[in-house]
Amino acid sequence: MVRTASRRKQRKTFTLSRQAIGYLEAARKEARSPSTSAVLEQIIRERQQQRERQKVNAAITGYYDSLTAEDREENRLWGEFSEDQIAAEESLVNSRRRPPLRGEIWFIKLPTDPPEKGERPVVIVSVDQRNRHEKADTVLVAPLTTTTHKDVPTHVYLSPGETGLEQSCVRSEDVSVVRKVNLSEPRQRLRNLSNARICQIARAISVAMGCGPDYVEPHS
C-alpha cells in the first residue's frame, strides 16, 4: 500500500531538555501510546487545532465587533422571524442575565404552542464568541424532544446521563435562530453536551440540507 505524501513520516532529530523528555515520557505512559513520537505528534496536532480555533474565534469576535446599528437591527429581526416579538420591558430585565453557552440546555416558549404547553428544551449550538457578545442578540439552538423515532439520520439520540433529562433526541433539522431574551435558564442543574455531540448535530444538519456524504439529489 502506497502512502500519500501527507501521511509519509520523516525522521528528524531534536534536542530537548530533560524536563521536556520527562513530560513526554509521562504523557506516553498515561496515554498508553506505543511511542514518544506518537505523543509528540498528537501534541503538535492539538496545538494546530487550537490555533485554528483561535483564528475562527477571532474572526467571529471581529465580525460582531464590527456590527453597525443597521446590522444589529437585521440580527434582531432574524430572531423575531424565528419566534415572536416580546415586550420591551421583558427584554430589558432578561438582558441582565448570564448568556447561554454552547452545549448548555435552556428552555423556550414557542408562540405557536397552546397556553397550557410548557417551555421546550433546546441545546445551544452556536459558538461562545457569538453567545457572549453584547452586540449579538440571537443564538443558534436545536430543539430536544422525548418523542424519539428510530433510524432518523437528522436526529441525534441522547441518554438521560448526557442531559439530566429523560431519554431524548435532538431534532437537528429544526435548528433555529432565537433571541437570547426568550430563553429561560433551567431551574435544575442539567449536564452540558460535549463538543463531539455538538459536532455530531452539525453533521446531522448537513444531512437535513442534503449535504451528507451519501446524499444523491433526485432527478426532476
Image (tube, rainbow, N blue to C red):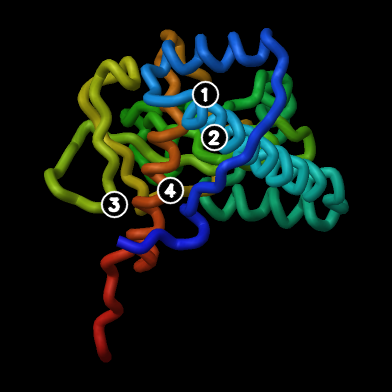
Disc 1 marks a residue whose amino acid type is Ser
Report the Cα–Cα distance between label 1 and label 2. 43 Å
**Residue appearing at x 78%, y 33% in the figure:** 134
Report the Cα–Cα distance between label 2 and label 4. 27 Å
Disc 2 marks a residue whose amino acid type is Glu
Report the Cα–Cα distance between label 4 and label 1. 23 Å
Disc 3 marks a residue whose amino acid type is Thr
Farthest left residue in view: 150
Report the Cα–Cα distance between label 3 and label 1. 26 Å
Q: Secondary structure at mark 4?
A: helix
Crowding around mark 1 (Cα neighbors within 10 Å: few <14, some 14 to 19, many 20+) is some
Quadrant for the C terminus, please: bottom left
Where does the image place residue 30, in percent across and percent down from the top left? 43, 12
Q: Is residue 17 left or right of residue 30?
A: right
Frontmost residue, 23 versus 154: 23
Disc 4 marks a residue whose amino acid type is Ala
Q: Which residue is mark 4?
A: 202
Which numbered circle lies on residue 41? 2
Query: Which one is in front in this view, the residue at disc 2 or the one at disc 4?
Result: 2
Report the Cα–Cα distance between label 4 and label 3. 10 Å
Q: Is residue 51 left or right of residue 166?
A: right
Residue 119 position by quadrant: top left
Question: Mark 2 vs mark 4: which is more N-terminal?
Answer: 2
Query: Which one is in front in this view, the residue at disc 4 or the one at disc 1?
Result: 4
* Circles 4 and 1: CB atoms closer than 8 Å: no
Question: Mark 3 vs mark 1: which is more N-terminal?
Answer: 3
Where does the image place residue 20, in percent across and percent down from the top left? 66, 14
Q: Which residue is mark 1?
A: 184
